[in-house]
């Protein structure tokens, strides 16, 4: 019951412009990136880097290949939204008000994270829906044959992509939660999150690529790449192993966050 | 006989029934025993033993960094004590979920979501605590913010935020209110409004722990007093008792040399003394006036006028803090 109260309380905060702007940027920029990709392919660009895209364009993976080009942006915005939103409770000092009204900290955290993850997932769903509708309309307008995209196989790939993307964003949300709980500051939390994903895993990936296959950012992305290889890294360890690793990371992040948050002094 | 200021009765002293009716029944809204909190090497709260009888307004005073806010955070379960124990409304500090539904709090500067309206900010907490939305409207009326309820909190003045903070503290219709500087940023009318509100709340049987630097304001409303310095309780008991026991002795003389002599003597004894043009103000027990007169004559300062007047809370506070530091 108190988790539901925390969830409902958090939903009220969705009216904040920072969240709405984040979701808006996700929708607009992702759609724009999808449009750019589509436009390049439709206009007959033969860039060698686009070979895979060109190959999959007319297959059942075509639509997902195009709208999936904005995945990195969706993941980055989702991570920032979750991390900044949670860390802001410390930075703004609002956490003390909340924990006085709901002293069972883990229930509050569960309710808040449920709401945040739901917001992030709805933003992603809206983004995919708008960008895929936009691309379909554009394709039909230019007389491009899209039957394969909307075929049963195309829909199966779409749903599979969606399911794995949901898992991926939940994984990144749990990572954001842990970083926010540990840093207790918006600037530090967002900075560390992005530095970890964009720089740290990248550098290690160059030095010791076999190790990074098991790193959280990598496995969260890998499970999406298993469905449509062109939108994420291919799981060299196999999909099930990658999925297992992703779930283990999620559980680990949740457990550590819960243990730390439960005992943490709230001085903000 | 000298009476050092730091020998005022502290928290261990039993509260008197005359000043706090409920204390006679042992009904303390707040009790702590040897509560301690360290942040690294810094001791914020040091073996604090205090009590607040139910149904009183307890003034909570101390200089900056005395440990008032940390104590309030300890009482609210926001920080964990390193040692000691306590009870709020009869429940152990270790079980904040048992007592916090009956406690309202305003801690330090009120914190809100600046891009949300005042009403929505209250609704966030009302939903979290499971209180009806009608309670939000009611409280916005109480703190006179109904006409600005839909404005973003970021547009509010400090005084308006403070009033919204008071409304936030009142959300659960609490039995115990902990207010940290509620008058901060309020204009005189706002301060009077808060004072009247506090009196109304106490008349309803609520207990209020009121931390404030406005000692004159506290003196008007409190019937229980807790003085804190360097994380320790210097005094905890009925305010009236403290004010009655301790007076301000005013020593006047035209001759500055004689005043110097007296000032030095008083400082040696350990009382807080404030120098004015031709006068010294000393916070001490009334009985000290006679002793002072004798000592002044012996020290070669016979031409003094010594008057005894009731001490203000401000002077007592200075006396206690200076005495503690010496």
Image (cartoon, coloured by chain):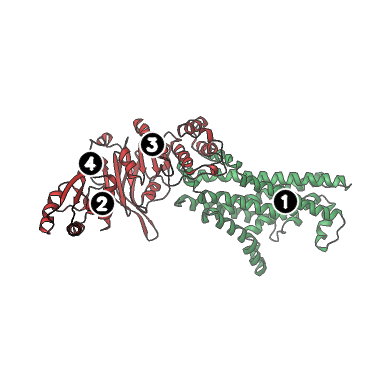
Instruction: Tell me the subunit letter for badge 4.
Output: B
**Rendered location of residue B103, percent (x, y):** 41, 38
Q: Secondary structure at mark 1?
A: helix
B271 to B117, vertically: above or below: below
Kindly report which numbered mark, 1 or 4, lies closer to the viewer in this rendering.
4
Q: Secondary structure at mark 4?
A: helix
Q: Secondary structure at mark 2?
A: helix
Cα separation, mark 1 vs mark 3, equals 54 Å
Cα separation, mark 1 vs mark 4, equals 70 Å
Instruction: Tell me the subunit letter for badge 2.
Output: B
Mark 4 crowd level (few <14, some 14–19, many ≥20, 10 Å Cα): some
> Do badges 3 and 4 share one subunit?
yes
B136 to A200, vertically: above or below: above
Cα separation, mark 2 vs mark 4, equals 16 Å
User: Quick check: A233 left or right of B65?
Assistant: right
- Quarter of the image that includes the C terminus of chain B: bottom left
Circle nearer the N terminus (3, 2): 3
Q: Are marks 2 and 4 in contact (CB under 8 Å)?
A: no
Kindly report which numbered mark, 3 or 4, lies closer to the viewer in this rendering.
3
> Which residue carries the number 1 mark?
A29
Circle nearer the N terminus (3, 4): 3
Name which residue lies at 32% across and 55% down. Answer: B230
Question: Which colour is chain A painted?
Answer: green
> Which residue carries the number 4 mark?
B241
Name which residue lies at 54% across and 43% down. Answer: B155
Taking depth in this image into account, of A79 and A242 the one nearest to the observer is A79
Q: Secondary structure at mark 3?
A: helix
Cα separation, mark 1 vs mark 2, equals 65 Å
The tag on residue B192 is 3
**Rendered location of residue B112, percent (x, y):** 51, 44
């Amino acid at each position: 019951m108190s988790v539901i109260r925390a969830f409902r309380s958090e939903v009220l905060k969705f009216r904040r412009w920072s969240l709405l702007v984040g979701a808006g940027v996700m929708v607009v920029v992702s759609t724009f990136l999808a449009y750019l990709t589509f436009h390049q392919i439709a206009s007959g660009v033969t860039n060698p880097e686009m070979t895979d895209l060109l190959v999959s364009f007319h297959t059942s993976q075509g639509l997902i290949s195009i709208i999936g080009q904005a995945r990195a942006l969706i993941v980055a915005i989702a991570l920032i939204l979750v991390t900044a939103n949670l860390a802001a409770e410390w930075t703004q000092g609002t956490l003390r008000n909340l924990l006085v009204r709901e002293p069972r900290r883990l229930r509050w955290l569960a309710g808040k994270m449920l709401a945040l993850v739901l917001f992030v997932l709805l933003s992603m769903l809206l983004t995919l829906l708008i960008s895929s509708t936009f691309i379909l309309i554009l394709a039909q307008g230019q007389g491009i044959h899209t039957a394969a995209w909307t075929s049963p196989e195309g829909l199966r790939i779409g749903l599979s992509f969606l399911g794995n993307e949901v898992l991926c964003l939940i994984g990144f949300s749990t990572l954001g939660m842990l970083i926010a709980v540990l840093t207790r500051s918006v600037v530090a939390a967002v900075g560390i999150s992005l530095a970890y994903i964009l720089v740290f895993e990248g550098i290690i990936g160059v030095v010791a690529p076999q190790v990074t296959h098991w790193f959280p950012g990598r496995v969260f992305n890998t499970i999406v790449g298993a469905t449509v290889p062109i939108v994420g890294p291919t799981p060299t360890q196999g999909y099930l192993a990658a999925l297992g690793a992703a779930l283990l990371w999620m559980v680990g992040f949740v457990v550590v966050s819960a243990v730390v948050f439960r005992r943490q002094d709230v001085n903000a | 006989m000298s009476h050092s200021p730091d020998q005022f009765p502290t928290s261990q002293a039993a509260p008197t029934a005359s000043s706090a009716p409920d204390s006679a029944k042992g009904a303390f809204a707040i009790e702590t025993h040897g509560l301690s909190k360290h942040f690294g090497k810094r001791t914020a709260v040091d073996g604090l033993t205090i009590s607040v009888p139910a149904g009183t307004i307890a003034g909570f005073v101390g200089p900056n960094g005395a440990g008032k806010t940390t104590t309030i955070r300890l009482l609210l379960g926001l920080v964990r004590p390193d040692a000691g124990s306590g009870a709020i409304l009869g429940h152990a500090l270790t079980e904040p979920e048992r007592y916090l539904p009956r406690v309202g709090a305003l801690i330090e500067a009120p914190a809100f979501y600046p891009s949300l309206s005042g009403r929505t900010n209250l609704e966030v907490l009302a939903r979290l605590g499971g209180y009806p939305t009608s309670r939000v409207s009611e409280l916005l009326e109480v703190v006179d913010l109904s006409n600005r309820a839909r404005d973003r909190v970021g547009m509010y003045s400090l005084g308006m935020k403070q009033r919204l903070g008071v409304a936030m503290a009142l959300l659960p219709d609490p039995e115990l209110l902990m207010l940290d500087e509620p008058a901060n940023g309020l204009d005189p009318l706002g301060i009077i409004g808060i004072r009247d509100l506090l009196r109304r709340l106490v008349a309803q049987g609520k207990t209020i722990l009121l931390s404030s630097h406005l000692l004159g304001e506290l003196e008007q409303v409190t019937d229980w007093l807790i003085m804190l310095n360097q994380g320790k309780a210097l005094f905890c008991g009925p305010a009236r008792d403290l004010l009655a026991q301790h007076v301000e002795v005013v020593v006047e003389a035209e001759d500055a040399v004689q005043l110097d002599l007296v000032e030095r003597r008083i400082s040696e004894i350990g009382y807080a003394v404030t120098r004015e043009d031709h006068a010294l103000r000393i916070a001490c027990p009334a009985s000290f006036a006679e002793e002072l007169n004798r000592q002044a004559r012996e020290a070669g300062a016979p031409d003094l006028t010594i008057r005894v007047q009731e001490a203000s809370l401000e002077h007592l506070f200075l006396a206690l803090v200076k005495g503690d530091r010496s």
